[in-house]
Amino acid sequence: MSPHFAQRMEKVEPSAIKELLALGADPSIISFGGGYPDASLFPAAQLEQVFRDVIRAPGGAAMQYAPSDGLPRLREQIAALMVNDGTPCRPEDVLVLQGSQQGLDFAAKMLVDPGDVIVTEDPTFLGALIAFNPSQPAYVAIPMDADGMRTDALEVALKANPRARMIYTVPDFQNPTGVTLSLERRKHLIALANQYDVIVLEDTPYRHIRFAGETLPTLKSLDTQGRVIHLGSFSKVLVPGLRIGWAVAAPALLEKMALLKVAADTQTSTLNMAATSLFLDRFDLTAHIDLLRRSYRHKKEVMLDAIRQHFPQDVTVTDPEGGLFTWASFPAGFDATAFMRDVALPLARVAYVPGATFFPVDEQPNHARINYSAQSEDRIREGIAALGKALRQAGPV
Amino acid sequence: MSPHFAQRMEKVEPSAIKELLALGADPSIISFGGGYPDASLFPAAQLEQVFRDVIRAPGGAAMQYAPSDGLPRLREQIAALMVNDGTPCRPEDVLVLQGSQQGLDFAAKMLVDPGDVIVTEDPTFLGALIAFNPSQPAYVAIPMDADGMRTDALEVALKANPRARMIYTVPDFQNPTGVTLSLERRKHLIALANQYDVIVLEDTPYRHIRFAGETLPTLKSLDTQGRVIHLGSFSKVLVPGLRIGWAVAAPALLEKMALLKVAADTQTSTLNMAATSLFLDRFDLTAHIDLLRRSYRHKKEVMLDAIRQHFPQDVTVTDPEGGLFTWASFPAGFDATAFMRDVALPLARVAYVPGATFFPVDEQPNHARINYSAQSEDRIREGIAALGKALRQAGPV
């Protein structure tokens, strides 16, 4: 039997680099590939305590079904986090999600007919493209510089694409580049969204891991017309294994996303929502985040120092003010995918994510996303030294 | 701003009875509405222990990201459960899902273009219709009798609908009717699916809660051409709050569903997969299920006894061999939705699910789904007596 698949599956394909990335899971490889937080900093004792107490709570409510919008107390707590971050938010503006990834799926499903345009940063988060593809969008990718998405180019793109339905952005410490959208551009982006009647999908998984510079307002806080869908996540600030994220949006949008939530998986895990909620009631998330910020700042510095010391001079890297990634750009002609396959993995025993996969339209081969959060400082130094040596031996391209 | 929604949102609408069902959450109401398992039977002490131990495990792996297909050990264990149930299955044939609800969403996404036909039982599980609707199917609903979906009518429907892509069935103790598909019809259904080149989506959340009669083979075990997608769930046999379900399907289908999993939410919660896996390694799920079977058999008997005693003679109910529901049919002209709104809720203080909502094409008003698993025996007796009194007072329609 050869199945007849729906047309929307046409763009649902395995990632071109899936097998390459799988090689990075070999423990003898030093992997800078995944977007993993540092497991040694997980608040395990606290999580053990809150899971124990929610399971013990009378009536077994944490093990039973729960409202598909999320536990009411957790929605209150997330609204309070948003307000503390300068973004007006009521509990009823919050939809709890199975990780913020689920919000990417819902936003595209809700807004994008086949052939409609999603505007993204260039490069952008690969997982977002994977989430959007079943909705069969066309992509328009906007170049970036050190201040994030170039909104002058965004304006040209919106003018040229009347079917643009959504602007997708990771404004803080973007994945994959580590770059942050400037305040001026945030304001310009909102003005353009208003002018061209486009929804903005603001994805903020790294936002609270800022270790330099000043916090900038969320796009949602600058939203004057209820057209920003804000996605947040506990994956990077608590633990990824809980799969708890959220959306904040205007009622007309959030109601539809809530219906898609019922359709997609009924609800997020009651146990995980209850445990997260009790963690927030009982422990100081801000103090925990401070610990992460100090650690990741230091690891970022260790990595950039090692890169300056070991990499050829013609390789540039971004210097992020937060988040988990730096973005290396190699000279034109360098193929980071081929280098990983032929040299970095088998000889240097180091993995990164080849940059080509992050470009929605025209793949550029000469970049790499390098993660500094997951490995210890020693492994960072060792891995970067090995990678630098391999790059120097490969010589100019 | 009034958002421009994608066409697929046209059928994504709030359930007509959402507000009515919400009234059933009032603790002064005896609710036979939800499909809730009995929370007093949740294995809380065991879950507390396995959550503790997976959180304590070295390296924090249970809190970190995990493979999107599911933890390898859990896939092995689910394959073993399938094999013990008489269905050939290898670990690589298993995809772990965020509850089996997620499999309903993926199957429709994968197979159904707008206007393609999904064939269902009549009535069928409301949550499945909600999951399928964003894929914009047309529905053809097949009448049922005491042996389940009438496969003679299925044959006529498949002949008449060349765009039929999928037959959706809950063969064991169906939701909402409690009826089980006979062995002869299982074989006929598979033969028809082969003949008309249609995928079968077999949904089995209640399968292991059998308390009378003999276990019948899964449709997947009768599948000769790799065209059955089997969905299973721990929600009813362990706890719903974990949100762990699974799909078993031929590689060509499972690969696509695995890609949709990455797109939809990256992965199911690592903590919940690890805890479920350790529970299965350490405790006897079969013994726990035996406890549920004994309890639910008894509750079912208490409910049917009470119905025989208190309901008017012209109300018939199914006598399920397992699962959570009986299906009441009232005389023609009776409106179970209006009766719930006007009498059952405000006067009898009892809730059920009005049957109209379970019919995909032509709503029949004179049925109700009544759950016997969630309430204590005393509350079952009390609620059925109050409902019976209200029905008798309402008199013949």
Image: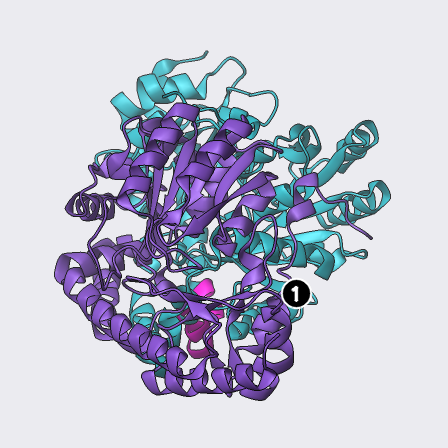
Chain colours: A purple, B cyan
Q: Residue at x 58, y 60 (%)?
A: A356
Q: Is residue B117 left or right of residue A90?
A: right
Q: Is residue A8 left or right of residue B336?
A: right
Q: Is residue B181 above or below residue A233?
A: above
Residue named by callout 1:
B93
Q: Which residues are magenta?
A: B275-290
Where is the C terminus of chain A found, in terms of image quarters?
bottom right
Which amino acid type is marked by label 1?
A: Asp
Q: Residue furthest right?
A: B195
Q: Is residue B192 above or below residue B57?
A: above
In magenta segment, residue B3: no
User: What is the magenta segment's predominant secondary structure?
Assistant: helix
- Front residue (pair A380, A47): A380
Mark 1 element type:
helix
Q: Residue at x 57, y 65 (%)?
A: A366
Question: Disc 1 is attached to a residue of which chain?
Answer: B
